[in-house]
Structure formats: C-alpha cells, structure tokens
Amino acid sequence: PPSNDLNDENPPADEKPVEPEDKSLFHEYKKAAIETLDEMTAEEKAGQLFLVRCPAAEQLELYLSMKPGGFILFGRDFAGKTKEQVINDIDYYRDSSKIPLIIAVDEEGGTVVRISSNPLLAEERFKSPQELYAIGGFEEIKKDTLIKSEYLLHLGINLNLAPVADVSVNETDFIYQRAFGKPASETAEYVKTVVAAMKDSGISSVLKHFPGYGNNADTHMGSAYDTRPYEQFVNNDFIPFIAGIKSGAESILISHNVIEAIDNVPASLSKNIIDILRNDMEFTGIMITDDLSMGAITEPESDLPPEIMALLAGNDMLIVSDFESSFKTLLNAVKNGDISMERIDESVLRILQWKYYMNLI
C-alpha cells in the first residue's frame, strides 16, 4: 500500500530522474557525432557503414565519390611503393571526404604482414605473436606492438586488424600460426597486452575472429560449421575477447563460422551472436563483419542480401570488396523498407563517435 510517511524516499516532483551514466566506449563524443549525423544525407550515411577493400586505380575515384567509412589496404596496395608514396596515397584517400576515412590494414606479424613483407617499407617482417613470446615473453610483445603501431600511424594507418584473439593450441588448426597458440587464460593475457599497447600508441584495435575459430576450417573457401557446445565457448573461446573488451578494444571482427549451438547462419549474419557481445559482454564499440564476399557468405540462401542481414543482425561496419554493388544494395533496401534509417543511424552514430575519438573529425 502507498505510504503516507513524509520521509518517504520519492523525490520531489520538480526533480528530474537521474539519467543513467553513459559508460559506452566513445560516450564523450556523442553530442558532436549527433550534430554531424544530422547534417548527413542518406547516401553519406550509407557510405559510412562500409570498410572497403582499397580498389584498383581505375575504380578509385568512383569509390571515393561514394564516401566509404574506410579503406582496408592489402599487399597489392603497398607493392613496389616507397614510404613517401604510401603516405601520399593514404593522405589522398583520407582527405577525399569531409568525414575522413578509417585506413585499416592486417599487420598481425608472422604470416599476415601486408606492409612489412615489402622490402621498400621495412627491413624485416614483423614477427608473429608466438615468435615474440619465445624471444621475450609479454614484454617483447608489448615492445613490438608499440613499435608497429607507431610505424603504422606514421604511414597514416589508424586501424590495425589485430590482435587475433582466437584460442588455438593445435598446430593443425587453420588459425594456429596466426594465434597466440596457448590456452584461453594466456591468450587473454596476450590480448590485454596488445590492446593496452595499441591504446597507448593511439591506434585502434580489432579483436578477431569472434566468437572464436577454434579448430575450424578457413571460411574464405566456404562455410565452416562449429559443432561445439555453447559451454565450450563460454569457458574457452570467449575469455580472450572479454579480456580485450575490458582493456578497451575499439572494435571486434565477426567471423563467418556457423556456430550451431547459437544459430544456423554465419556468425556475421547472426543477431544471436551480436546480442552476446552487446548484452552479455557489454561491448559498446564497433562490430565489423569479416569480408562479405568470402565463400562462406556467398553461399547462404536468404531473401535478403548479406549486407542487409549483417546490418539487421546488429553489425556496424561491413567489409566488402565490390563497394559499388553493396552500396546500391543498401540504398535499395532503404527504399524498399527492408531496413530503416533508424537502424542505419544507430551504427553511423557509433562510427562517427569512433572517428571523433580517433581525432579524424
């Protein structure tokens, strides 16, 4: 029954309820990002959702005119180029839009080195996490991460698609050479070390490949089905990702593995997977799909294109190779009512906050 006690704890009517404190990763940039968002056209918003494979020269101006959120550079974009040429190219890409581009690269060290494999750009390749650990433990990993991050920032790269947070202890696993190669708790320590060093340097990190490759096949070739029970993910694969989130990783890359215990579609298209990250792990950063042109994604049968499925699942940025086609697909989906502008605004706002946080805007 209602209490008549004058000392009741209900606040006086003129007091506003206290807003819950915004603890999201980029919360201090929200106001500025909203102002920027309000001035954008539907086309400009659509472009921001794409992290695009840097095109060949003949497509460059077309791609830049569609104002993508960012470019990912691969080996071919560095081949035969000097440091000065790379810096000039990247300056041109980044400043071609009033909202500067994210410039991303996979420079993991070891077998995945898009830049340091070019002798004009580096005296030697960056080493793999396993090699670094063998030389000098976590201290060596930290030192290498700081050197690498500074090197990438000098070229104009502001996002390194690292660290690999997959737990892999079997040398036969597809992902083993790229992973830390130790059990979950040690892999978590590795992820924490790398994310902290990247944050100190001022370059953004990507935890990949959520929810964990385990011993699965390469999804560039076709769908990889993971039949492990959900508990195994909770007790094993999720641990390094949680460590990375707690250390302030800005983004997470979602794989195309089909995790049968969670959903029957690739993780990158699964709302259940995204909900685990957003709700259970309280991740407030940027969700990025692995490349939607990979074999695993060109297979699923659905009425909706993968770009739209990925956004409806809750991803923020989509990695694509054929930007022109994906861009048109998204604009058509908005026109047809397959996806709302509210859903697009939600992710664009997050991406803009990230860009303010990165001092790009």
Image (cartoon, rainbow, N blue to C red):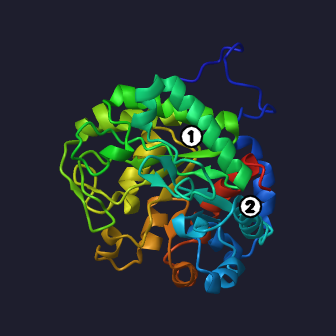
Asked which secondary structure carries label 2, the reply is helix
Q: Residues within 10 Å of mark 2 (few under 14, many from 20)?
A: some
Q: Residue at x 60, y 19 (%)?
A: 3
Q: Position of residue 100 (x, y in %)?
A: 75, 63
Q: Identify the residue position indicated by label 1 in the image.
A: 249
Position of the C terminus by quadrant: bottom right
Q: Position of residue 177 (x, y in %)?
A: 34, 45
Q: Which mark is residue 87?
A: 2
Label 1 amino acid?
Answer: Ala
The answer to which quarter of the image holds residue 303 is bottom left
Q: Position of residue 116 (x, y in %)?
A: 56, 53
Would you say residue 20 is visible in this rendering?
Answer: no
In the displayed structure image, the side of residue 159 where residue 167 appears, left or right:
left
Asked which secondary structure carries label 1, the reply is loop
Label 2 amino acid?
Answer: Ile
Q: Residues within 10 Å of mark 1 (few under 14, many from 20)?
A: many
Q: Residue at x 48, y 41 (%)?
A: 127
Calculate the distance from the C-alpha at mark 1 to the C-alpha at mark 2. 26 Å
Residue in front for this viewpoint, 269 or 106: 106
Q: Residue at x 72, y 32 (%)?
A: 18
